[in-house]
Each structure stands twice: as C-alpha cells, then as structure tokens.
Amino acid sequence: MEEREHIKTLFIRLAEGDATAAEKEQISEYLLEGGSADDLPMPDELQAYGPQMTVEEADQLFTAITAAPVRYRRLTWPRVAAAAVLVGAIATLCLYWFSRRPADTLYTAEGVSKTVHLSDGSVVQLKAGSVLKVPGRFGKDKRDVEITGAAFFTVEADAGKPFIVHTPHAFDVEVLGTAFNVDARGGKAKVVLTRGSVKVMAATQKAIREMVLKPGEMADFDPAARTLSRRPVNTLFYSAWSDHLMTFRNETLAGVAQHIREEFGQELRFADPSLQQLVFTGYLSSADIRETIKTLEQTFDLQAQRINQTIILIQKKTK
C-alpha cells in the first residue's frame, strides 16, 4: 500500500515539475519492471495540478513518461504487454490534461484600439490592427502572452510569476509589474518603458542578449541585422496612442495623410501638391477625424472640403 502511494506521489511530482533526477529514474524503473496502471493517480487527484499546466508542459510530461527505454530483451512477454498497458493509461491521463485546459484566446483590435483585461489583473491596450494571444490559463510560474502589432501593457505585480511578452521577431520582454509599450510592426520590435523595470531578450548575431531598461528608455531590435540598442526617449511620444492620440515629429503632411488613411480609412488630399511638404510636429486625435482636420486647418491656415470619403485641404486665400 505504501509503495502504491509512493508511486502516485512520484507521478504528481513529475506533473508539478518538481521530480528529481533520482525520482524520474524510479519512474523509469517502474515502467521497465511492469508496474500496474492501478498505481497511477486518478484524474480527480490531479485536479490541483492539471489546470496549471501549459500545452508545452503537458507535452513534456507525456514525452518524459513514455520515453523510458524499455529493454525488451530483459522482460518477459507478459511484462512487455503490461508496460504497454501502463503507457496507454499514462497517455490517457495526459490527454485528460489537454482536454481540461481552456483554449488560447485571440484578442483582435480591428479598425480601432481595444482594451483587454487579463485574469491576473493586468490591462492591455491594443493598437488598431494588432492581435494579442493569451493562454486559457497562465502557467504556475510565469505569465506568457504573444503580441503581433503594438500594445501598451500595465502589468499587475507578481514577483513569483513574471509576465513575458513574446513578439514574432525573436524579441521578448520580461516584467514583474510595470507599464510599457511594445511595438512589433514593420519588421522591427521596440519597447518603451514608462515606469517600473523590464528585461528584454533578443537573438542577436552572437548570442541571446539581455538588457534591463530604466523608465524613459527605449530598446530597439532589428531582426534583419540582429542588433539590439537602447536610448532615452520621450515616453509620451510612444504611448500617446493609448490615449487616442497620433504623435508626429517633423512629419510631412504627406506622411500625416497616410496615418489618417490607416486610422480612419479616409483619403486626405491636397489642392496644391506643395502642401504635402509642409512639416508637422505634435499630436492629432485618433478618435475623432473632425478634431484631427480642425487641428491641421488651424495649424497651417487651411480649409477642408469633403467629397464622399475624401477630404481635400486647400490653402486659404490671403486678403
């Protein structure tokens, strides 16, 4: 009886990821010596552990248990058959974990920015056109999410469970509790830290490089060149979009028109082509196109005319 309870404890420790090398060897020997499936923990005994496992952890568990080298020449045929039945029972337990784990959730911000409240209390503001992938349940020792596009994160502090943001560019951000902006658009990735502390990890030319940022700093990663750099920045310039503002620094009106098309789906044209070369620095509303156009009119002494979905800017006539 004591041996059966010991075997159950070993499998549970393996499920938790706490099994030592010696304990894993005991499990391997147990499989080789034809242990009984009746000695495995039942699903209701694993409820405290299964929900915490990620898909990767469950897969590793299945591989670790079933990969024991069964030396058939040392076993009688009945023991080989018993081992096969046992492996089948273990596979059933692993499938049970998979079936109970909630599916990942995809949050998509189509056309407008979107605010997402995560189960740990963290808040993510998704920029228009961005996608956030969140597991159905965070792991027991970390909180992993994936971002495609741009987002502003306000992370709930948890020293024992770091929050990790993955991007498509071999560039990850690890935090404990902080506020920062991640932008993985346009073939590059950058992080701007507003408050707290973050560690960025990037696959550079020589190795995985880590860098700890201070508030007011930006880490910039170029996946093509495999270079990671940092510099001080005005954080508001990079996070203003989360307050429904578009930011511009020495941008031509031609460039401003492109941003307006992306944000509002409306064309901005110029009666005089030379107006396209005027330079704008400042903020424009990304929530109300009327406010946006009004700001441009007042800044450059222009007048707007609307024709269907097209807005035409005309230079006011001087008196």
Image: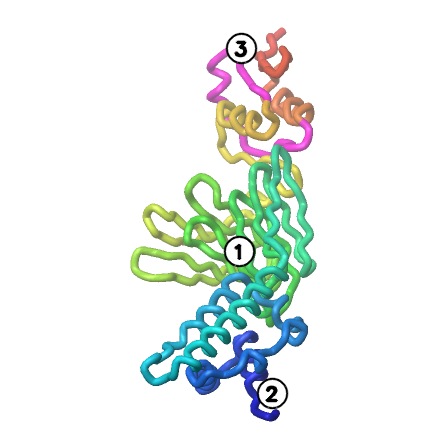
Q: First in sequence, mark 3 or 2: give its number.
A: 2
Give coordinates of residue 182: x percent, y percent: 53, 49
Kindly report which numbered mark, 3 or 1, lies closer to the viewer in this rendering.
Answer: 1
Q: First in sequence, mark 2 or 1: give its number.
A: 2
Q: In this figure, which residue is indicated by the disc labeled 2?
A: 5
Judge from the rendering whether residue 297 lies leftward or rightward of residue 229; answer left or right.
right
Give coordinates of residue 179: x percent, y percent: 61, 55
What is the C-alpha distance between the residues marked 2 and 1?
Answer: 40 Å
Quadrant (top left, top right, bottom left, bottom right) of the N terminus: bottom right
Marks 3 & 1, CB-CB < 8 Å contact: no
Q: First in sequence, mark 3 or 1: give its number.
A: 1
Say if the magenta span includes residue 93. Answer: no
Q: In this figure, which residue is indicated by the disc labeled 1?
A: 165
Instruction: Characterize the local packing of mark 3: few (<14), some (14-19) or many (20 or more) Cα atoms within 10 angstroms.
Output: few
Judge from the rendering whether residue 27 lies leftward or rightward of residue 74; answer left or right.
right
Q: Which mark is drawn over residue 271?
A: 3
Marks 2 & 1, CB-CB < 8 Å contact: no
Callout 1 amino acid: Val
Say if the magenta span includes residue 283. Answer: yes
Give coordinates of residue 237: x percent, y percent: 56, 43
Judge from the rendering whether residue 209 lies leftward or rightward of residue 121; answer left or right.
left
Give the vertical position of 117 relative to 38 (above or below): above
What is the C-alpha distance between the residues marked 3 and 1?
Answer: 45 Å
Judge from the rendering whether residue 200 lies leftward or rightward of residue 50; answer left or right.
left
Quadrant (top left, top right, bottom left, bottom right) of the C terminus: top right
